[in-house]
Amino acid sequence: MTENVKKYGLRVLIAASIYLFFRLTSEPMYSEKASDITVWPFLLLFAIFVVLFIWEVCDRVILYFARNFTHYLTSKRWLFFLFLATTLATFPLLTAFIYFENYYLKIWLNCVRDSYEEFFTDLPQAFVVAWLLITVEILKVYYTHIKNMEVEKNRMQKEILRTQYESLKNQINPHFLFNNFSVLDALIHTNQVLASDFLNQLSKLYRYILDNRENEMVPLSRELELLDSYMFLLQIRHENCIFLERNVTINPDNFYIPTLSLQMLIENAVKHNSFNKEHPLHIKIFTEDEQFIIVQNKISLKKQPASSTKVGLENIKSRYHLQSDKKVIIYQSEETFKVKLPILTSIKFA
């Protein structure tokens, strides 16, 4: 309530100042009665009403576009379109008000000499004032949007720093290491050649994690290379009960996705589903046009559901939010769980 009082109080003051400015700087065309104490307050109040009304219309038009087309507010071409749209919304109203003032109000007050001449004198002045108001409001919305983007960017970066550690910890946790070292120990005694391959792929996986722990986005090609190492470890560890079907029909060097995102989604599928040799876990990774890369698996939930903090998915969503307006799409039915990751052609922050 207090903010509205301040807002409209300031606007009334500005409207009165505008009226007095033009009254003092323009060549007088009013009759002698225009200076009468019973006349000029009506003209002042009418001028204040017109400015407030036009200002409110400007606010509504600009607010509508700001809410529905937020991501275009940094475009100069879009700002010009917004300026033009607001002009078209306010100028017919302004023309009607000026016409009413000179052909009805001033005649009723008996303070006009030539309605035609005063109409075409007042109208350009009113248009200039309206353009100033429109420009001020658009610039205010623009700089507020820029400021909010900076605040949101800082908030997202802090959130990413928090979730990044959780994400990395999920990959290099003692349980994960223990399982892989247990498999490696068994292979050393039974199949030294396979043990060497297992150790080599495990080293590649952790080298990738360490090399890219500071990168929010990486080329899709690098994520697919990591996937080869990760799937090798999973298949050895789970005795070939997991199968990955991959169908990427685009050039992966030209697109970007969040670091470790594919690995996180596969890990979630392994974590939450039961599988064995008779009923293996089938995971599909494929592209949809040049818009999404999709990770999909059939649902066969464990009888005792694994605990989930959903940190991985939230981390992925946060990094997309920082990079673009494209959204991660999650689809779940009784039989299928699917995550559609947008693939980006450019990135803001590596």
Image (cartoon, rainbow, N blue to C red):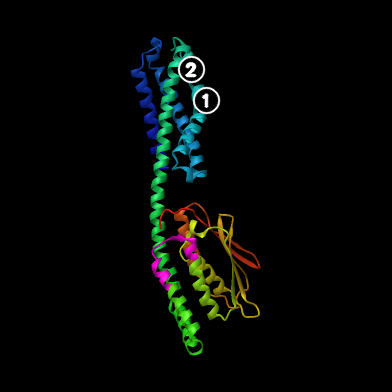
* Residue 173: quadrant of the picture: bottom left
The one nearer the camera, 219 or 260, is 219
Q: As shown in the figure, which amino acid type bears the numbered disc 1?
A: Pro
Residue 92 image point, x, y percent: 52, 25
Residue depicted at 51% across the width and 16% down the height: 104
Mark 1 or mark 2: which is in front?
1
Residue drawn at x 40%, y 34% as measured from the top left: 136
Does residue 310 appear in this view? no
Give the magenta-colored segment's residue range: 205-223
* Residue hosting label 1: 92
Is residue 335 left or right of 184 when viewed as pictured?
Answer: right
Instruction: Give the residue at mark 2.
Output: 105
Question: Looking at the picture, does residue 63 appear above or below residue 179?
Answer: above
Badge 2 marks a residue whose secondary structure is helix
Residue plotted at (56% across, 71% down): 269
Helix, strand or loop for disc 1: helix
Query: x, y (%) of residue 81?
Result: 49, 35
Q: Which residue, as the protein is rendered here, is positioned at the far bottom?
A: 189
Q: Is residue 224 left or right of residue 151?
A: right
User: x and y percent of residue 51 in the render?
Assistant: 44, 28
